[in-house]
Every structure is written in structure tokens, then in C-alpha cells.
Amino acid sequence: MNVNQRRNVQYYPMDYWLLFSALLLAGIGLIMVFSSSGIMAERFYHDKYLFFKKQAAFAVVGTLVMVFCARVNRRFFYDLTYVWVALVIVLLVLTKVIGATVGGGKRWIHLGPFSLQPLEFAKIALVFYLAFFFAKKQELVQTRTFTVGVIPPFLVTGVMCLLLMMQPDFGGTAFLCFILFCMCLVGGTRVIYLALSAVIGAWAGWMLIAREPYRLKRWTAFLDPFAVAKDEGYQLVQSLYAFGSGKFFGAGLGAGKQKLFFLPEAHNDFIMAVVGEELGFFGISLIFLLVGFLLVRGFRVAFLQEDLMDRFTAFGMCVILALGFCLNLAVVLGTVPPKGVPMPFISYGGSSLIASFICVGVLLNLSRNRS
């Protein structure tokens, strides 16, 4: 956008419907975190409000960060694009070096009583970089210059994915690859390159699954979880039991049984199973509608932007949220192999919640102007 164009920028009130839907989802998340974690927190930490209080603190911090992102000049994001990329790469390296080992992987950096998961912020940094690249190099991308128009975004994403695989974090790697694919799709990358990369990615993914026994077991458990209901399929089976017992209106808020040490990670990645059990099909449907409304408002913001950088950035933030919603629900419903993907705004976890608020904050910022 040149100087004359910037003088013609019209400023509008931010999209308050987008803001309202995000805050409402976060509020629902707080309620469900308390409902799903209270008994476990009381038994193991002697404070049934422990996870609720932490999530409430994360929500306050996330809201403040969202307000900052919504009000700051967006050049703050764009001018520091390479700084954000370098910062998350350093964090991913530190995760491997000093990160805490949980479940066989190093994916978190402990900061006192809290933990930081760099993956959540790597998603945002990658979107900023890809938006910057496709906006600035659009002519090279459209003229089909492979070495300059295609290799750089794949290389930067590949570095992040390599560091994630060293943790190891196969799910996080797949998430970044999905972001790359979506951004390339709207950025003008030739379809033949995308098709070829998709085939290579699928082959590489299968090789990584087949060569690691625990990943292969997860795959077979996904295909028939009830055949290994006491082993690899246990979590998914308990999730399906929770959804099935919820029926139409659910057992009632706080009255669920699966969170009584039957369903592992009830307040984390599988919190939607608790929602399904306690609020039933009706409650799940309301959340689906709210999620859909948030995404419609977000993609509307992207559609209204005329500046390529703004449009690609808004689209990327929506992709992060949309992938998080869809992949989490796909996992808990058993339509994709089990993998730790938090439900944006709903699942317990500071990194995920703050990152989700950042995405909404950037969208609110962009909703204030149309060229």
C-alpha cells in the first residue's frame, strides 16, 4: 500500500460481534475447566479451584494481550516479522534443551508455576511470515519463479517442523504444514507444486508413523479403538462413551461421570467430551454455532481487506483458529488419530488461550480499517 493509498484508509469501529463471540467462548471454557478439573484438582492438589484459578489468570492476561493487539499500529507486527520467526525458533530450540519431559516429549518450558508451549506462538509467527512473504513476493509467486517464489516459505516452515519433530511433536508439525498449505493456496502458489508437496507430505507422514511403534499403535487404535479399549484405544473409547451418555440435553453441568478419573486429560484436549456428556447434543450444537459465528466474522474481516498483507494476515489468523477447532473435535469424535490438539478458548492451558486471544486481537485490529 503506497502513501496515497494509506491516506485513503477509512477507519471503522472494531468488529464487536467477533469480540463478543471470543469472550463468550472463553467464558464457557472457564466454566467447563472448573467442571472437568475440580474433582481431580481436589484429590491431587487439595484445591478444587486450582485449574480454574490458573485458567482465569490466563484469561485475564489473554484479554489484555488481545486489547493490545487490537489497538497497536499493525506495523508493529509486520515490521518485526523476522524477529517473531527468530524468537520462536530460539524458543523451540530451548524447548529441546531445557524443556520439561512430559509423556515422552519435550514440548513445554517451565516458568515457575506455569509452562510455556512455543508451538502455539510458532503458529502465529509462521502466519506473519507467510503473509509478509506472499504480499511482498506476489509477483514472483504469480510468475512461477520456483526458487524465489516457492522455496523460502517451505524452508522456513521446514525448519520449525524439524525442531518440532526433535521434541518430538508430530501433531504440531502437521498443524504447521496445514497452515503452510492453506496460505500457499490463497497466496497464489501453483497447484502442481501444492499437489506434489501434499503427496510428499503424506508419504513422509506415513513413514514417520510406520517407523515409530507408538505412532503406529495410535493409528491402529484409531481404526478400531474398541479392539484395544484397555490400551491405546482407552482415551478415545472413554470420549465416545461420554458423548453417547450425554444424549440430547446432557447429564447436567457438573454431573458428568467420565471426568471421575475415567477420561484422561478431561480438562485439556478432551474437554469437549465432558461438554458433550454434561450439556448433551444441545450444548455441543450451541458451541458449534458460536464457533461458526466467530469464524464467519473472522473470514469476513479478511475478505474486506484490500491490502494483501492485511488480507493474508487475517486469513492466516482465521486458519489457526479454524484448524484448532476442527482438529480437536475430530480427535475427540474419533475421526482422526488421537493427538494433543487443544480446543481454542475452551481447553485448559495458558499458551493456547493467550495465542487464541492474540489471533482475535489481530483480527479486531484489522477490522478497524478497510482500504
Image (spheres, rainbow, N blue to C red):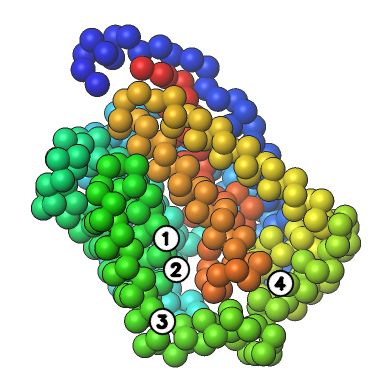
Tell which tag, 3 or 2, sits nearer the viewer.
3
Q: Position of residue 95 (x, y in %)?
A: 35, 67
Of the image marks 3 and 2, the number of the one nearer the N terminus: 2
| Residue for badge 1 | 175
The residues tagged by marks 3 and 2 sit, at their Cα atoms, a distance apart of 11 Å
Residue 239, numbered circle: 4
Query: Is residue 137 shown above or below 17?
Result: below
Mark 1 residue crowding within 10 angstroms, few (<14) / some (14–19) / many (20+): some
Q: Is residue 16 above or below residue 184?
A: above
Disc 1 from disc 2: Cα separation: 6 Å
Residue 245 lies, with reference to residue 33, above or below; the image says below
Looking at the rendered structure, which numbered label has been put on residue 171?
A: 2
Answer few, some or many: residues within 10 Å of disc 3's Cα (few below 14, many 20 plus, some between 14 and 19): some
**Contact, mark 1 vs mark 2 (Cβ under 8 Å):** yes
- In percent of width and height, residue 66 lies at 50, 36
Residue at position x 41%, y 72% in the image: 170
Q: Earlier in the sequence, mark 4 or mark 1?
A: 1
Residue indicated by mark 3: 209
**At label 2, which amino acid type do we have?**
Gly
Horizontal arrangement in the rendering, residue 265 relative to residue 261 (left or right)? left
Quarter the N terminus occupies:
top left
Marks 4 and 3 sit apart, C-alpha to C-alpha, by: 23 Å
Amino acid carrying label 3: it is: Ile
Query: Residue 261's x, y, as percent?
Result: 75, 77
**For numbered disc 4, what is the local secondary structure?**
helix
